[in-house]
Image (cartoon, rainbow, N blue to C red):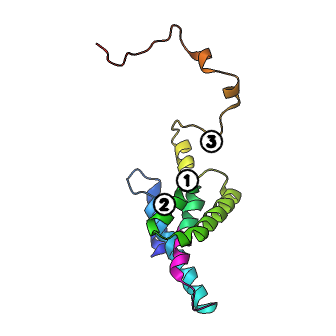
């Protein structure tokens, strides 16, 4: 199921139909995490809870593809209402961000897509000109303002 969903997600993400990528990533990541959890449960220790691995797998795949950190932690921990899963989720997201940065650079999939579509957006770091130019340098004089209630 995870392989088919991953294949369909890859095929439909670039075309212009509203399919979304967030929930398929959660599904594929949780399936792969659950498989790893079941493997560890059978081969390492029978007391292992595979559901925790499913949550960590979903967090890892989301973190690696989207390069999000704090928002993903909040979404996943609040969505499960389980504060005890905070450490595995944070660890999975940090490791996946690090590995994703080594493999594919700093940008997430949404940043890459916006750059390819040539959409305007603010960079993560301001340009060097921002320290030289001030708001007063580009304003018109006299300053045009609006009253609270226009007639």
Looking at the image, which residue is at 42% across and 57% down?
Answer: 20
Residue 93 belongs to the span the image colors magenta: no
Is 54 contained in the magenta span?
yes
Q: Earlier in the sequence, mark 2 or mark 3?
A: 2
- SS category of the residue bearing label 3: loop
Give the residue displayed 54% in from the left and 77% down from the top.
52
Q: Residue 89: horizontal and vertical position, in percent?
A: 58, 67
Q: Which mark is residue 75?
A: 2
Given the current orientation, which residue lies at the most extreme top position? 142
Task: Bin the neighbour count of mark 1 within 10 Å (Cα to Cα): few under 14, some 14-19, many 20 and up.
Answer: some
**What is the secondary structure assignment of the residue under circle 1?**
helix
Please tell me whether residue 47 is drawn above or below residue 14 in the rendered image: below
Q: Which residues are magenta?
A: 45-58
Q: Indicate which disc, 1 or 2, sits on the residue closer to the N terminus.
A: 2
Mark 2 vs mark 3, foreground winner is 2
Asked whether 60 or 70 is in front, the reply is 70
Report the residue marked by disc 3.
124
Q: Nearer the viewer, mark 1 or mark 2?
A: 2
Residue named by callout 1: 109
Q: Tell me the distance, in whole angstroms, between the alpha carbons under discs 1 and 2.
A: 18 Å
Other residues around mark 3 within 10 Å, as few (<14) / some (14–19) / many (≥20): few
- Across and down, in percent, residue 30 comes to 50, 73
């Amino acid at each position: 199921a995870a392989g088919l969903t991953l294949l369909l997600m890859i095929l439909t993400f670039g075309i212009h139909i509203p399919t979304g990528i967030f929930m398929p990533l959660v599904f594929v990541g949780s399936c792969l995490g659950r498989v790893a959890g079941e493997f560890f449960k059978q081969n390492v220790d029978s007391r292992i809870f595979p559901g925790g691995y499913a949550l960590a797998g979903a967090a890892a795949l989301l973190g690696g593809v989207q390069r999000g950190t704090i928002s993903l932690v909040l979404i996943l921990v609040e969505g499960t209402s389980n504060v005890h899963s905070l450490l595995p989720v944070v660890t999975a997201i940090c490791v996946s961000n690090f590995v994703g940065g080594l493999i594919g650079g700093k940008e997430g999939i949404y940043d890459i897509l916006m750059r390819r579509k040539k959409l305007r957006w603010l960079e993560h770091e301001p340009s060097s000109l921002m320290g030289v130019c001030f708001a007063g340098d580009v304003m018109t004089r006299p300053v045009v303002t609006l009253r609270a209630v226009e007639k």
